[in-house]
Image: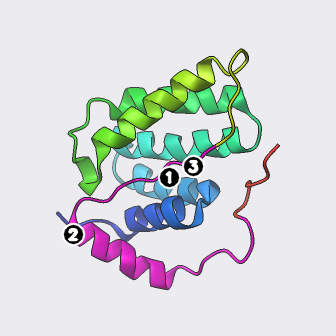
Amino acid sequence: MNYDPLYAAYLVYFNRDRDYFECHEVLEELWLANDRDPRYKGLLQVAVGLYHFRNGNVRGGYKMMTSAYTLLKPCRPDELGIDMAKLVTEVGIYADRLASYSTEPFSYYDLTIRILDSKLLALVAKMSTEIRPALSQPRGSRRT
């Protein structure tokens, strides 16, 4: 499979930089260019959910994670060259924990998207050299 550089950039921003704002920016462009593909929307919502929760917006994080889970659950386990099964499980757990946050609060934590396809891994590695790492914390990384 051939992967779009915007998708690879999303993975760089997600896994390396934890810059969920930039994840949203690059993946939204790809999502719109691909007839609003629900897989891309789900991945976009995972990043937005993490962005919201990291910034203290539990309700926004919950809404995005729940929606992402619904969109990504029907995907094949290795959809889009990533370990989608693992990601779907982790997003579902995150959504469940956020649902009970008022009675069982927990500290924010990042997720990592495991790349399975060697072609995608090579493209992400190439993009990693082209995308300059953030010099300071990514946008929206304040922990409240």
Q: How is the image coloured?
A: rainbow
Image check: 7 left or right of 56?
left
Q: Which residue type does callout 2 highlight? A: Ser
Range of the magenta residues? 109-137
Q: Position of residue 75 (x, y in %)?
A: 25, 36
Which mark is in front, 2 or 1? Answer: 2
Residue pushed farthest left? 1
Q: Earlier in the sequence, mark 1 or mark 3?
A: 1
Nearer to us in this view, 111 or 140: 111
Residue to which mark 3 is pinned:
110
Q: Is residue 37 visible?
A: no
Query: What is the CA distance from the residue labelled 1 to the residue labelled 3?
Result: 20 Å
Nearer to us in this view, 36 or 130: 130
Q: Which residue type does callout 3 highlight? A: Asp
Query: What is the CA distance from the residue labelled 3 to the residue labelled 2?
Result: 23 Å
Quadrant of the drawing holding the C terminus:
top right
- Assign a secondary structure to mark 2: helix
Mark carried by residue 28: 1
Residue to which mark 2 is pinned:
118
